[in-house]
Amino acid sequence: MHILITGAAGMIGRKLAARLASDRVLAGQPIGCMTLVDIVTPEKPAGTSFEVITAATDLAAPDAAAAAVAGRPDVIFHLAAIVSGEAEADFEKGYRVNFAGTRELLEAIRLAGDGYRPKFVFASSIAVFGAPFPNAIPDDFFLTPLTSYGTQKAIGELLLADYARRGFLDGIGIRLPTIAVRPGKPNKAASGFFSGIIREPLAGQEALLPVAESVRHTHASPRAAVGFLIHAASLTPEKLGPRVNLAMPGISCTVGTLCGPGETGAGTATSCVTTAGEGTD
C-alpha cells in the first residue's frame, strides 16, 4: 500500500506519519511506501521499515497536485491547510490553500484516469457549523460557517461529496473538533488559546484568556485525531453510507471546567489542568 499525507509537516501530520510508521499496516494491509508533502519538506518518522518520500510543494501551484499523485497512492490523507485565524486574517491565502489546493488535488485524481480511485480522507472542521447550536450537533446539522476558514472547509466537503458521488474517489470527510493540547509554540488558530491556557501555565508561563470562563467548546486530543483519521481510512463505502462528511466525537466543556476556580478571566490564567486525559500525545 502507498500512502500520501499532505500537510505532513504539521502537528497532526507528523503524529499520523509516526503512527503509521509504527503500525506498518493500514486497514489490514501492509504499508509499502509513504509520501509526505507540505509547503516545507516534512521530516521522516523514525524507525520506518518501508520507503518514505518527502517533498516540499504548494498544491495550488500548477502541476503540483498532479505530481503529488503521480505515484498513484492508494490512500490520501489531505491535511494541508492554513488554520482558522490565519485564514481570517489573510483572505486570499486562505482561499488559495484551503480551497484551491483542495480542488487541484481532487482534479489531479480525477484526471489521472485508468480507473484510479484512491481512498481520500479529508480533514474538515466543526468550523463548518454556525450558531445557534443545539446541545448535540448531529452530522446533518446545517452548514452556516461564521468564518472564512469554516467556509473553505465547507466547500471542501461539498467538493469531496460530489467527486465521491461521481466515482472519482472513495471519499470521507471528518470534522475535527479543536485539538488540545497542541505542543510547542502557539499557532494562528482562533481556538489556539484552549491549548494555551493549559500548556503555558504548566510551563510556568503566562497564558492570555480572551473569553469568559462560561464559553463552551468541544475538544479532542492529538492522539484521538490520529485515531479518527486511521479509522476513517478503513471504512468502506458500504459501511459509511450516503453521508460522507461526519462530525467526530470530543469532550465538551467550558473554559471554567478546563481551569480551576480563580484561574481564568479576561486577563491571564496561571494554573490549569486538562480533563482530556491524553495530554499532548
Image: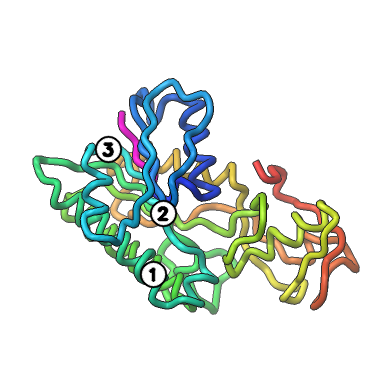
Residue hosting label 3: 73
Identify the magenta region: 1-5
Residue at the location (30% across, 66% down)? 100
Residue that sits furthest to the left in the current view? 114
Q: Quadrant of residue 154?
A: bottom left
Q: What amino acid does circle 1 point to?
A: Gln
Q: Where residue 201 appears, x then y in whole percent? A: 82, 57
Residue at the location (45% across, 70% down)? 150
Q: Is residue 123 left or right of residue 103?
A: right
Residue hosting label 1: 152
In contact (CB < 8 Å): disc 2 and disc 3: no
Q: Is residue 157 visible?
A: yes
- The quadrant in which the N terminus is found is top left
Q: Residues within 10 Å of mark 3 (few under 14, many from 20)?
A: many
The answer to which of marks 3 and 1 sits earlier in the sequence is 3
Residue at the location (38% across, 53% down)? 122
Residue hosting label 2: 39
The answer to which of marks 2 and 1 sits earlier in the sequence is 2
